[in-house]
Image (cartoon, rainbow, N blue to C red):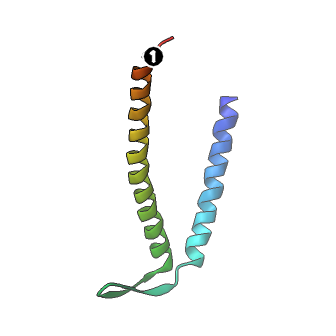
Amino acid sequence: MKHDLSMIRLWLAVGLGALLAIFAIQNSAQVRLSFLFWDWESRRIVVIALSFFIGLTIGWLLKGRHSGRATSDARAKEKKAGNDGHP
């Protein structure tokens, strides 16, 4: 069973990698970018990837902040109720 799951994951990774390669090839055209006082040219796939990773980083930073607060609030409620998490 474990072997089957690892094969499925391998084929899924190969398939997604192939799709990513096709996507990158089809989006390799140069685009002109402007940000504040700067103008430059870059490949479209680089702009897409950079935007993705910036969004991923922002989401990770905000999630970490929110989940930490939720966890500490839950612990405080358990302490107040007299339940330390053990049955």
Q: Which residue, given by chain and number where applicable, does mark 1 sit on?
A: 83
Left or right of 48 in this view: 33: left
Q: Secondary structure at mark 1?
A: loop
Q: Residue furthest top?
A: 87
Which of these two is toward me, 62 or 45? 62
Disc 1 residue type? Asn
Which of these two is toward me, 1 or 44? 44
Q: Which quadrant is home to the N terminus?
A: top right
Measured along the vertical axis of the image, is residue 48 above or below residue 76?
below
Which x, y percent locates residue 20? Answer: 58, 64
Q: Residue at x 45, y 73 (%)?
A: 46
Which x, y percent locates residue 85? Answer: 46, 18
Q: Residue at x 39, y 28 (%)?
A: 76
Q: Residue at x 45, y 19 (%)?
A: 81
Which of these two is toward me, 78 or 57? 78
Q: How many marks?
A: 1
Give the quadrant of residue 26: bottom right
Query: Callout 1: few (<14), some (14-19), or many (20+) C-alpha neighbours within 10 Å?
Result: few
